[in-house]
Amino acid sequence: MTQRNSILQGVLLLLFVGVLLLVGVQVAEGIARNKIGVDWSVFERKASYGNDDVNYLAKFFQALWFTVRISLLSIVLALLLGIVVGVSRLSSNPVVRGVSSFYVELFRNTPLLIQIFFWYFALVAALPEGVRLALGDALGNAFNVPGLGEAVIASVGALSIYTSSYIAETVRAGIQSVPKGQFEAASSLGLSGTQSLTQIILPQALRVVIPPLGNQFLNLTKNSSLVHAIGLSDLFFWNVQVQSGEGQGVVAIISITLGYLLLSLTITGILNLINGRLTLPSR
Amino acid sequence: MTQTPHESKHLESAPDIIVARDVHKYFGSFHALQGVNMTVKKGEVVVIIGPSGSGKSTFIRTLNRLEPHNKGEITIDGIELREGSNLDAIRREVGMVFQSFNLFPHLSVLQNVALAPMKVRKQDKATAEKGAMDLLERVGIANQAAKYPAQLSGGQQQRVAIARALAMQPKIMLFDEPTSALDPEMIKEVLDVMKGLARSGMTMLCVTHEMGFAREVADRVVFFDQGNIVEENTPEGFYANPKHERSKLFLSQILGH
Amino acid sequence: MPAVLGLTGGWIFFQRKLGVLALSSSLIGVALASVLLWPMLFPTQIVGGLAMSLILAFLGIVFSLPLGILFGVGRTSSLPIIRRISNVYVEFFRSIPFVVVIFLFYLNLPYVLGNNTQFQAVVLALVIFTSAYVAEIVRAGIQSLPRGQTEAARSLGISGTQTMLSVVLPQALQNMIPPLVGQFISLFKDTSLTSIVAVLELTGVARGIQSRILVANFEVFLFTALLYFGVAYGLSRLADALEKRGPVAR
């Protein structure tokens, strides 16, 4: 039995490696045939975009840092919005409940890319001019992309609202996972509705919610790759520049794949740490 | 151990603390309480028994408005229970202990007990925790104060739940089947705490089938069936010589083996 | 938020003298390009944008099923090498953005598949990416089954493979239908990302129209969003209904 299993595993492993090798060799041949060099020294070349006169390596880390910052800001906003909407979905007021359900359904059922375009081409343009210019300048400078502030408004707006609709559902499910007896015990002690929510329900819901919430943070970070479509210089934007400007598509895609893997693994690591901290002792 | 509480308590002269008149409760079309009338004197210990679905739990849950009643009148310590603002005031006077403990799993034992005094009575942390430690001492569990509920046995958890309710210094304690979820060997430790409480003069309403508890400390046994009170009797009278046919049938079912 | 959307919409509408004309023409334009199966605005386009999005999503989910089941079962395997390979596959594709996978395949696969195979490359990207998520659904479906099912089958002397094929998978697959519909909705929305490598699906068509007429951004993207919403919301209702029917195995 065990011997048969080892043979089976060996065969499957060989098959898997074989397929990978086959594809790899084909791609390598194709690349050679099309005379596309894989030149890692592209990192040392001076970047053809931006006006800060640095090489692609520096640009890579700028882009990575940009991705991190825009994700962090959007995550904070998404979390705040998501909690408010999620709690509202359980409101006893039918209007509040209806509006928050509509919010969730609307933003969950349309593609993020369309939402980004909608913000950028329609909503931001419709902001009162004073607000738009002031906010745009502030965000543009804060993110080191002067002149692209409006794209930052659109990106942060779309990313955080899109993600908040998922977070709201997570929060709602988390609250509903807290047993009814907890509400009853809290109110029979004389705690008010708000006190019950903040002292008893939310701290417990939080523990249920953290793993799926972590997934949403991961998704948001990955989804931030779409902001390149309105001209923001994130990690994916760097990839497009290196691919089209320097003809080094292979180097570019491998580099950003590693970049995104690094971000995902970091977030997963932090989440595991938090999860470990929050786990309550039991017998 | 055979002292009868009636003589020592002078209940006849005590004021009424709970007055329920013609209390009705519907769950959809199900008529769970069908005009319950009950008066409880200050310091009285009442044991409520009855088959499941008889309305006994529903009734004590209406007394702190966890289940709002649909018709009738409930007065707790002179304040009428109705839709409106007196609810928090009444809930401070009425402690409740649940079948499933309902301890707050994210708080330590000490925090469970100190939470309501801090948040509702606005005590400072030191005062609230001092009071909480005293109560944990009283239920015999002070050495577990730093642990979390999931680290305790069921009996220990229920004693913490009693301490938590007592921390609000209630005038009335409601017990909703406090020993039904416990393993047999843990029932005694909880009942001992409840007996001590009864002897200290607390007004108590207990939904429980523990006959020993009823015989030892109850002033009165109330038998519920089909949404109303069928029989009220002294513990001795009820268990030895029930008056009503349905009481007899019920007793034969729970004692028959 | 919806109120804000409505207000801004109305405001833009009011501001523009030719608002009504712009709105109706853009609506009709997007509708024709999206819904009808003829090349109206893009002569190279054989099908409309919405149809293209649906075709991509359909191809993606159908071909991702076998791969997803393979790796999903692999993740529950007792054989460590198989489990590890499956884990690496699933975790890798779930850790990088979809648009990166699309770009990777779009640029490199034609070297393997031959010239003018960009469309196939994009479909393969959808398949590979989705299969990682389907694998997770399969794994959850298998692990949600009571252990007693496997134990009962094994105690009857049925082999491990046979137990998986004839007892576990048939039950697990039925329970997986609602999350698979959810995955299809995600994939349908995600086909919008293929517009980044110039596939003319709904988003690509919308961008094309927007960049040509330039005056009715709000209307173009609102209408496009509504088209996506109609399909996605309808399907999510379907998934809810399927879920309410409850799991088959108990």
Image (tube, rainbow, N blue to C red):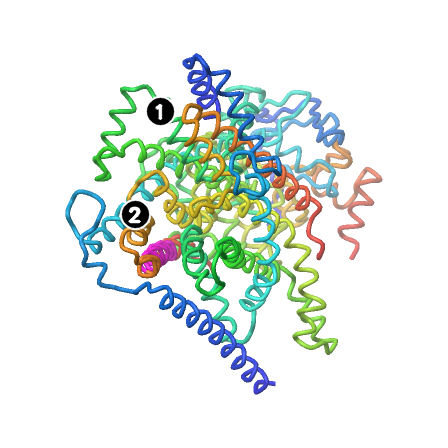
The image quadrant of residue C143 is bottom right
Chain of the residue displaying label 1: A
Mark 2 residue type: Val
Name the foreground residue: A88 vs A158: A158
Q: Residue furthest left?
A: A53
Left or right: residue C45 versus residue B253 is left
The image quadrant of residue C152 is bottom right
- The residue tagged 1 is A125
Indicate the position of residue C64 as horizontal and vertical percent values.
57, 58
Q: Residue furthest bottom?
A: A3
Name the foreground residue: B7 vs A118: A118
Indicate the position of residue A176 as horizontal and vertical percent values.
54, 41
Indicate the position of residue A70 as horizontal and vertical percent values.
31, 42
Q: Which residues are magenta?
A: A255-272
Q: Residue furthest front?
A: C43
Q: Bin the neighbour count of mark 1 within 10 Å (Cα to Cα): few under 14, some 14-19, many 20 and up.
A: some
Indicate the position of residue A120 as horizontal and vertical percent values.
37, 31
Question: Foreground mark, 1 or 2?
Answer: 1
Name the foreground residue: A138 vs C216: C216
Mark 1 residue type: Ala
Name the foreground residue: A215 vs C88: C88
